[in-house]
Structures are given as structure tokens and as C-alpha cells.
Amino acid sequence: MIHAKWSFIFVMMLLASGTKAQDLTLDQLVDQALKNNQQVQLSRLNEKQTDAQISEVKARARPQVNLTGDYKRYLKIPGQVVPASTFGGAEGSYQVLALGLPYNLSTSVQVSQALYSPSINIGLKAAKLSVDLASLQTLKTQEEVAYSVSNTYYNLQTVAQQMAFLRSNIASLDRLIQVTDLLYKNKLSQGIDVDRLRINRTQSQTQLESLQGSYQELINALKYLTGTSQSEPLSVKIDIDQNASVPALIANDAVNRTDILILERQKALNEQSALNTKAGFLPTLSAYGVANSTFFGKDGENSVLKNVPGYWVGLQLNWNIYDGSARKSKLVQQKIESQKLSIQSDQTKENISMDIANARTKFYVEQKNLIASREQVALAEKVYTQTQLQFKEGTTALTEVIQAENAVQDAQNNYLNTLINLRSADLNWKKASGTIIPKQ
């Protein structure tokens, strides 16, 4: 029974070790990045930190309790100068009178409550706006991360496709080298023909090895963006969807842009800051109550310890009537800041409109170019195949075969470049229109 149990575990371990890692799609990579990217995590911590600021502002509106204590041991009791006549002395003369005991201990508890303080309510509204701003800044970080992941992913797919083209070309060259070498042995071709083909193969192999290095670099970049350890494997789906389309256009694209929303919150915060500055012209009123207990004592044969309690309540008014025009100067600065934010908002909206128009135009152009370049690849491959057959039959020279091969590579590279441009235009359109990740 025990032997059967261990056999079962061993088989399961073999099956687990042989399971191929799942190839992650772009959506899965983006989701992983939005959860694990360190920059996104820092933004979320900023959100939590801002949430705590609301509690801090609310605390200012609640009662405040303070406990103080003071202990004194007088080595010489301080005195006061009083008229000597108070104690039967001569008029016009004074004497020093020391009052008190050498040991003094005083404790006091004070409870205060703000009754009127405009800055507290203003500060609470500003704190809530800060929370909204922190949330938008997190969303902005997520959009930037999603853009970087998507851009890296498309580059990875392109490199993978280039590698596939090169492997196919190398396999075709290997077959052609075998045929040419056989023709040379039968004195139907020249030895230099084989050398030319081998030179082309070496060049293609060198390009392939270079692309393999680029591929690994892009994988490492995706690991960094998605919060994956560099020591862990990352398998990515590299199949290219050649049927991308522009998402449906929406009315008033600029509204979806996080940049605009951030500027709006910053402007609202600046307005609250100006209101808080104006509140500085008004007085604040607080109520308070104090419970005090003071112990007086001395040691020695006639030791004494006396407690003198005291209780009182009151109202406290604070009013900074003149501060040297500091508040007035601050209001001027805040007004200028509001004007700057308005200009930045208008500028951003214009820039967004331009980005959307350019990305849309670029996408449609590259979409047409992709169809044409795909046809060029098919045509070049057809010519290359026919040229190879003609060469094997001895009806054409090797030079034409090499030219046909180069034409295939040029067509493939042109196709890939067009595909890169198409993906870039699609990605830039999503970024410009604020749809790169769904808004919550």
C-alpha cells in the first residue's frame, strides 16, 4: 500500500514537471502588471497615505485633551517685594517676603473644543479632493504601465515573427545548398555558387542569434513590468493578430483622459487652498475646561503636604488681525496658479485632440499598407519558389535565386515594419482617447 502511494506521488511529480507553462496573452500580462508592478504599488500606498490625511483633518474638529505636569524643588523659595507697612513696618519701606513651600507638584487636565474654525471644514474638503487626486494618479500610473507592457509585447511579437522568417529562410537555404552542392559534384554548377549560398546562410544565422538576444531582453523587460522575478520563467503568446481594428470612437474623447481629470482636481484643490487662506482673516473660537491640582509640601519635623485644587472653564478667541500682508500675497499666488492650471488644461485638451486625429489617420494608412505588404510577401515567396525550381532545372543562374531570396527578405521586413506601425498607431489611439485600460 505504501509502495503504491509513493508510486502515485512520483507519477504526479513527473506530470507536473512536464506541464508546459501557460503562454500569457497581452490582457493577462497587463492584468499581472496592474497588480504586481512596483510603481503601481507605490501609487496605491500614496492613496492609503492620503486616506489617512482625512482622519487627521477630522481629528482637528473633535475635542482635544491635554495632560500636563510640573514638579519643582525650590532650593531657595523665590520672594516678592511688598510694602513693610502691610506687616506694621514703616511707611515707604519694603521688605522681601518668601511665600510657599519648597516642594511643588502641579497636574492639570485641559479639554478644548473648537466652536468656530472655518479652516477645519475647508481642510476636510481639500483632503477628500486629495484622495480623488491620488486615485487618479494611480490610474495614470496604471495607464503608463499598460502602455509600456503593450508596446513591449508588440515588439516581442515582431521579433518572434522575424525569427520565424529567418528560420524558414535558413531551412530553404540549407535545401538549396544541398541541391547546388549536388549540381557542383555533377559539374553542373560552380563551386563559388555553393560558397555564395553559405555566406548568405551565415549572415542569416548571425541575424537570428542577434534577434534571439533581443527577444530575451524583451522578455526580461516584460518580467520587470509585470513584477515577475528575473529568475522565474515567463512564457508569452507570440501569435500575431493581423485583424486589429480601431475601437468605436466616443463623443468628447478628452473627458476620458486621466490627464484632464487630474488637472481638474488640482484646480479644485487650489481653490480650496485659496478659501483656507481667506479663512485666515476670520477669528477662531474655542471652549475649554481645566481641572488643576497643586500639591505644596516640605519635609522635616513639621512636614507638610497640602493639595490645592482648581477648576475653571472659558472661551478662547484667536484673531490674527494683521500679518504683514502675507495672506494677501499668498492669495495672489493662488490666483496665478489657478490661471496656470486653466491654461494647462486647455493646452492638454488641444494636444489630446491632435494625438487622436494623428493616431486615427496613422492607423488607417498603415492598415491599407499592411494589406499591400502582405500581398508583396506572398508574391515574393511565389517568385522565389519558381526561381528555385528553375535553378534546379538549370534554366536560371544562382544570382537570380539570391536576388529572389533578398526580395523575400525585403518584403518580409517591410511587412513587419508595417505591422509595427499599425500596432503602434492602435496603441497610441487607445492612449490618446483614454481607453488603454477600462475606467472604473
Image: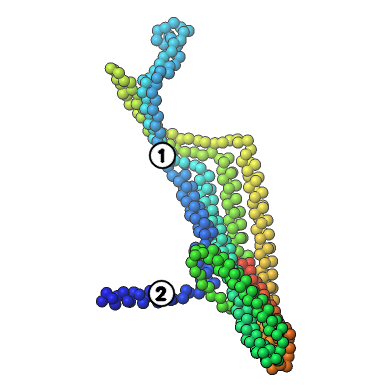
On screen, residue 379 above or below 233: below
Report helix, strand or loop for mark 2.
helix
The amino acid type, in three-letter code, at marker 1 is Val
For the N terminus, the quadrant is: bottom left
Q: Residue at x 38, y 23 (%)?
A: 73
**Residue density around tag 1, few if under 14, some if 14–19, many if 20 or more, within 10 Å:** few
Q: 370 or 121: nearer the eye?
A: 370
Q: Earlier in the sequence, mark 2 or mark 1?
A: 2
Colouring: rainbow
Image spot of residue 431 (x, y percent): 61, 67
Q: Residue at x 65, y 79 (%)?
A: 201
Q: Residue at x 73, y 90 (%)?
A: 396
Residue wearing tag 1: 65
Q: Nearer the viewer, mark 2 or mark 1?
A: 2
The amino acid type, in three-letter code, at marker 2 is Ala
On screen, residue 114 above or below 236: above
On screen, residue 241 above or below 440: below
Image spot of residue 395 (x, y percent): 73, 93
Q: Quadrant of residue 198?
A: bottom right
User: How many numbered dots are placed on residues in this image?
Assistant: 2
| 154 left or right, relative to 190 | left
Residue wearing tag 2: 16
On screen, residue 354 above or below 338: below
